[in-house]
Image (cartoon, rainbow, N blue to C red):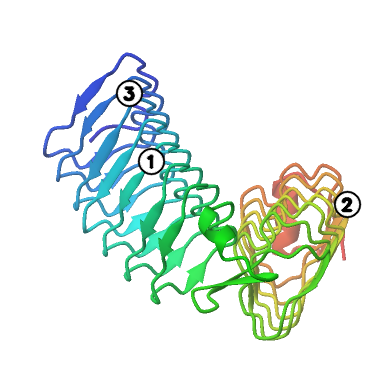
Amino acid sequence: DIDEGAFSYCTSLASVTIQNGVTSIGSSAFDGCSVLANITIPNSITSIGDWAFSGCTSLTSVVIPSSVTDIDEGAFSYCTSLASVTIQNGVTSIGSSAFDGCSVLANITIPNSITSIGDWAFSECEKLTNVAIPDSVITIGGAAFALCKALVSITIPDSVTSIGGGAFYGTAWLNAQMQGDWIEISNGVQNVYVGSQTEVIVPEGIKAFDFFDSQVERVTIPKGVTNIGDYAFTGCNALTGVTIPEGVTNIGYYAFAGCDALKDITMPNSLMSISAYALSQCDKLTDITVPSNVTSIGDHAFFYNPSLLSVTIPDSVTIIGYAAFGSCDALTIICTDGSYAWNYAVENGIAHKAA
């Protein structure tokens, strides 16, 4: 195996042949090898680690063999000379940011073994013009093709059941769909708001919506919605208030991240989970009451909310993720003495008081 960081920032390494029999390429193994122009990946390789070839700015093409099951996070990100990628049949997932920032990538073959395309997987691939997504794919992550400015054609099969917010943000393809305030993608799997109104009532019947980076100020969500999707309101820096209706059970990954003006968010009693980064970097949030049926609060869920003074956490919460309240320096957690939240506050040096 090739260990984590084994050749990281070996800036004179120009060519690598990996012998057949090697099974894994560790995280950041060739990260920052800026003159590496040729890499042969043998059929014995089963895993390519996070950021394995990130920043290999001289790499021009790569063939990922069928023996690899997953292309991990950031594996080929910011390979700014990478023009062609062939992913052989057998690979099942393309991880978050896997090819993010590959600014000259013009050709990508996605085989029909792929079931998921991660968040930011191909974002800022500015030369990518056409993408055919095979009917094996079920999920397309948030911002997966964001800022692929030249992307004019994308085929989305009926197999896709989930599309994250901002998946096609800033693409020529999405811009060409504009006819009203909403763009329906793949028979309603996602609905992108492209209007200019500051106060928006989401139409009845819409179950998934995408306000990624819009200038909306207030949103009313209809009954019947059960999930606030990943990246649904990310970067909505004019959003001041939102009421989440009864029936919603989950607030997705990064759902309200970077909503700088958000002061008022009402969560329903039906809510059961708050995902990672869901309400991170919401500078104006001051007080939060977590509803009584929530059981888990994800990693970094409220990270870097400098104005957050109090969060009331019920006894139902039994999971609080890593740095869920990191960099919330003014925070006091209000909870039952001896509860999971109480013990979490004690262990992490967070001010707390009994409810």
Q: Is residue 136 above or below residue 217?
A: below
Q: Are marks 1 and 3 in contact (CB under 8 Å)?
A: no
Residue 7 image label: 3
Secondary structure state at the residue bearing disc 3? loop
Kind of residue indicated by mark 1: Leu
Kind of residue indicated by mark 2: Leu
Q: Position of residue 237 (x, y in %)?
A: 78, 51
Lateral position of residue 200 relative to residue 234, left or right:
right
Secondary structure state at the residue bearing disc 1? loop
Lateral position of residue 103 relative to residue 333, left or right:
left
Identify which residue is drawn at 43% across, 38% down.
Answer: 102
Residue 309 image label: 2
Mark positioned earlier in the residue sequence (1 or 3): 3
Mark positioned earlier in the residue sequence (2 or 3): 3
Q: Are marks 2 and 3 in contact (CB under 8 Å)?
A: no
Residue 105 image label: 1
Q: Nearer the viewer, mark 1 or mark 2?
A: 1
Q: Are marks 1 and 2 in contact (CB under 8 Å)?
A: no
Residue most extreme to the top: 12
User: Could you tell me how far apart the alpha carbons at marks 2 and 3 are, in whole angstroms?
Assistant: 45 Å
Number of other residues with Cα within 10 Å of mark 1, as a class: few under 14, some 14 to 19, many 20 or more: many
